[in-house]
Image: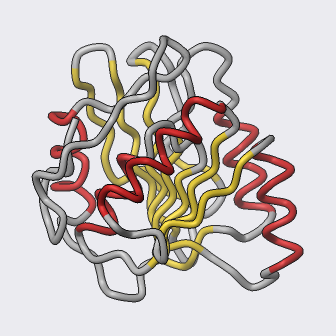
Amino acid sequence: MRVIAGKYGKHRLKAVPGNNTRPTTDKIKESLFNIIGPYFDEDTRVLDFYAGSGALGIEAISRGAAQVYGFEKNRQAITTIKENVAAVGIEDQYILKSGDNRKAIQQLRREQPDLQFDLVFLDPPYKGQQLVDVIEAFLADHWIAAHGRLVCELSKEDVLPEVFGQLQVIKDVTYGITRLVIYRMEEEI
């Protein structure tokens, strides 16, 4: 696993040990960033709600994002994220929130009531996905900025609606067993 492109391109990244996380393959990551980027403005804020190894957020920083908030509850994953962030040298740009994701993001809302994200990654473990609930909560709490994008990585069998509140699907693509659904926050639908 590696950073694909940008300032930190070719840096090797560690995977989370064990079978509790499912890392995004380099091929899917490269395709994803070609669709949504491939590079970002220097004020782009990113939320990686199921951060795993931190690879998606690190890739976003490498491609110009200003800041990433990574949320993770798995202890091995948290250790891996810290190691990967330190190896790349982006501790000042990658903010790791550990523990229960929903409680941690509620705490972040209390700390920063106006914070919004230009890009949100939702890549939960395939088993027990609750993407619809999470997306509804993100919309209700106004986490996604106007014209922001929401990227959902899920099993190819899973289905998400074309329109989700103000979110409109702009791309729906399958790679093997993995499906990417990319939404854009619209002003009015």
Image location of residue 32, percent across then percent down: 25, 47
**Snapshot quadrant of residue 25:** top left
Color encoding of the figure: secondary structure
- Location of residue 15 by image quarter: top left
Relative to 177, say whether 170 is above or below.
below
Q: Is residue 130 above or below residue 165?
A: above
**Spot occupied by residue 165 in the image (x, y as percentages of width and height):** 66, 57
For residue 6, what is the image quadrant? bottom left
**Quarter that holds the N terminus:** top left
Image coords of residue 155 (percent x, y): 44, 19
Residue ID at (50%, 19%): 158
Left-right relation of 164 to 63: right
Say which of 110 and 178 sits in front: 110
Side (left or right) of 135 relative to 187: right
Query: In the image, 48: left or right of 14?
Result: right
Q: Nearer the viewer, residue 120 or 185?
A: 120
Figure label count: 0
Q: Residue at x 57, y 29 (%)?
A: 76
Q: Residue at 34% x, 54% y: name it.
A: 170
In this view, 183 is above or below 154: below
Q: Quadrant of the C terminus?
A: bottom right
Q: Position of residue 22 (x, y in %)?
A: 43, 22
